Image: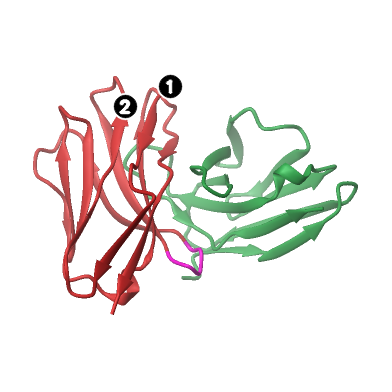
Amino acid sequence: ETGVTQTPRHLVMGMTNKKSLKCEQHLGHNAMYWYKQSAKKPLELMFVYNFKEQTENNSVPSRFSPECPNSSHLFLHLHTLQPEDSALYLCASSQGTTLQETQYFGPGTRLLVL
Amino acid sequence: AQTVTQSQPEMSVQEAETVTLSCTYDTSESDYYLFWYKQPPSRQMILVIRQEAYKQQNATENRFSVNFQKAAKSFSLKISDSQLGDAAMYFCAYRTYNQGGKLIFGQGTELSVKP
């Protein structure tokens, strides 16, 4: 599956570091999403962008800062994270945001905060 | 809070046999979509099957089918003729207008397939 790519695939960072996660979709979609997947917990939606505009912020702490420069790219900027932020971060895209739209997921970035 | 419950954290099936993964959800909406996603060990989540709440007929995709019981708010996934490649985490999810179109996921069921 190469429709949605994410880099890096693995990231280890200290609590004082600043890093960014990148997501790119090659499907011509207009909506992009960030999800957090922690062990033994359901996926949690973090942010939604539709036509580059943020339409959803699911009460995410400000140490996570998304950026969507165009419909094909989505970034998640990380700074002063906590160990409990360690998780798999999944990016997804869909044609639109209507109910029936299928979301296509990337492989994820496995983040470890020390 | 609107939730999705997958009561089976782990399931196991013999190759070529049939297995059913259960899912229940809680919503007051009448129109919504239900989804089953598969996440293999490589971690790329892919859609297995989806069902619109207004459709009476259960969705089918090759060896995958659902048993949608709207009144009971149940949406189970049946995998027939199980294959080794079916081993993965399976997530049930739904979307409603009330939730702003957000996908609400269950906790997942880890399916193992024995040769």
Indicate the chain on which mark 2 is placed.
B
- The chain letter for the residue carrying disc 1 is B
SS type, badge 2: strand
> What's the magenta bit mostly, secondary-structure-wise?
loop
- Is residue B42 located in the magenta-colored stretch of the structure? yes
Is residue A8 visible to the viewer in this orientation of the structure?
Answer: no
| Residue position marked by numbered label 2 in the rendering | B26
| Helix, strand or loop under label 1 | loop
Residue at label 1?
A: B1
Return the x and y of residue A67 as percentages of the image width and height: 70, 44
Q: In this view, does B52 lie above or below A91?
A: above
Kind of residue sitting beneath label 1: Ala
Badge 2 local density, few (<14 within 10 Å), some, or many (20+)? some
Q: Where is residue A110 in the image (x, y as percent from the top left)?
A: 65, 59
Which color has been applied to chain B in this rendered view? red
- Specify the farthest residue to the right: A16
As shown in the figure, which amino acid type bears the numbered disc 2?
A: Asp
The residue that appears at 78% across and 37% down in the rendered structure is A63
Instruction: Give the magenta-colored segment's residue range.
Output: B40-44
